[in-house]
Amino acid sequence: MKDEESGNRLGRYLRARRELVSPAQAGLPPGGNRRVPGLRREEVALLAGISPDYYLRLERGRDRNPSPQVLDALARVLRLDDVERTYLLGLVAARPRAPRRRRPEQVPARVHQLLAHLPVPAFVEGRAFDVLAANPMALALSPSLRPGENRLRSLLLDPAEQSFHQDWAKATADFVAALRTSIGDDTDNPRFVELVGELALSSQRFRTLWARHDVRDLGGGTTTLHHPVVGELRLHRDKLPVDDVILVVYYPDRGSDSDGKLRRLAEIAGDGGTGRDGGDGEG
C-alpha cells in the first residue's frame, strides 16, 4: 500500500510481473534456495542488459523515466504480450495532470431504443462494469444484468455466479485484468477507488488477482453459461463503444442448440416467466 499511495505504479507493476516469470521460462536454472517467487531483481537486470542498481531504482520509484529501449527489454524478459507492453509504456508516459472533468455515464436515447428492439440479451455498461441499461432478454439471462448492478461485484460476491459461468476462475481473472486496463492512469476516479476498495475488503479472489497486476482487453469472445431454466448456453459476445459507454450483445450461432434455448428463454420472459432468480424480468 505504501507504493500505491506514493504513486510508484511502474515499480509495482515490474515487481508483480517478475514474480510471475519462472527461472525456467527465462532460460535460467531453478537454483536451490530461491526465497522469492519468480525472478530475482538481478536476474531481470542481467537478462534485460541493464545494471542491477538501475533496475532496483526503477522498482523503488527512484527513476521513473526509463528509455523505450529499456522498457522493450524489460517487456521481453517479463514475457509481456502486446496489451501488457502498451500498459507498461503508458505507466512511464503518464504525467501529472490537472483534475479531470468527468461527465456522468449516460445511455443515449437511441441506444435505449435499440435495446428494446434486439431479440437477444443486450445491455449497456460503464467503464467500471456498472450496468446502466438492459433489455428484457438480458434480465432473463441473468439478474446480475439488471441496471444498478455491477458485473464484477456480482461475479465475485454472488455465489450463483460460480455455477452460472462454466469457467468462473477464468471469468474473474479476465474481468479483474480488464478493470485495471480500464482504469489506466485514471487512478483517482472516485468510482474506481470505491469499487476497488469495496472488493479488496470483501473478496480474497479479488485481492489475489489484483496483486498480479494483469491487464487485458475484454472485448469480443465466446462464453458458456449454465442457465437454471434452459440449461447450457454457448454465446458469442461483442462489445460496441457508443459515446462514453459500451453496448454488450450476447448471441448464439444461428440454428444451434443454444439458439433454440435462447428462443425458449424469450418465450418464458415474454410470458412473465423467471430468469435465474425467479424475478419478474423488469429492469
Image (tube, rainbow, N blue to C red):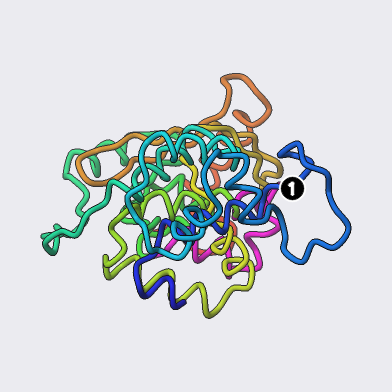
Q: Is residue 184 left or right of residue 20?
A: left
Q: Is residue 150 one of those drawn in magenta? A: yes
In this view, 277 is above or below 230: below
Q: Is residue 55 left or right of residue 244?
A: right
Q: Which residues are magenta?
A: 149-172
The amino acid type of the residue labelled 1 equals Ser
Tell me which secondary structure the magenta stretch mostly adopts. Answer: helix
Please provide percent x and percent y for residue 271. 50, 49
Q: Residue at x 43, y 62 (%)?
A: 150
Query: Which one is nearer the viewer's eye here, 59 or 200?
Result: 59
Q: Residue at x 58, y 23 (%)?
A: 253
Q: Which residue has dot 1 on it?
A: 22
Q: Is residue 123 left or right of residue 270?
A: left
* Residue 274 can be seen in this image: no
Please provide percent x and percent y for residue 42. 63, 53
Query: Which one is nearer the viewer's eye here, 188 or 56?
Result: 56
Please provide percent x and percent y for residue 269. 50, 48
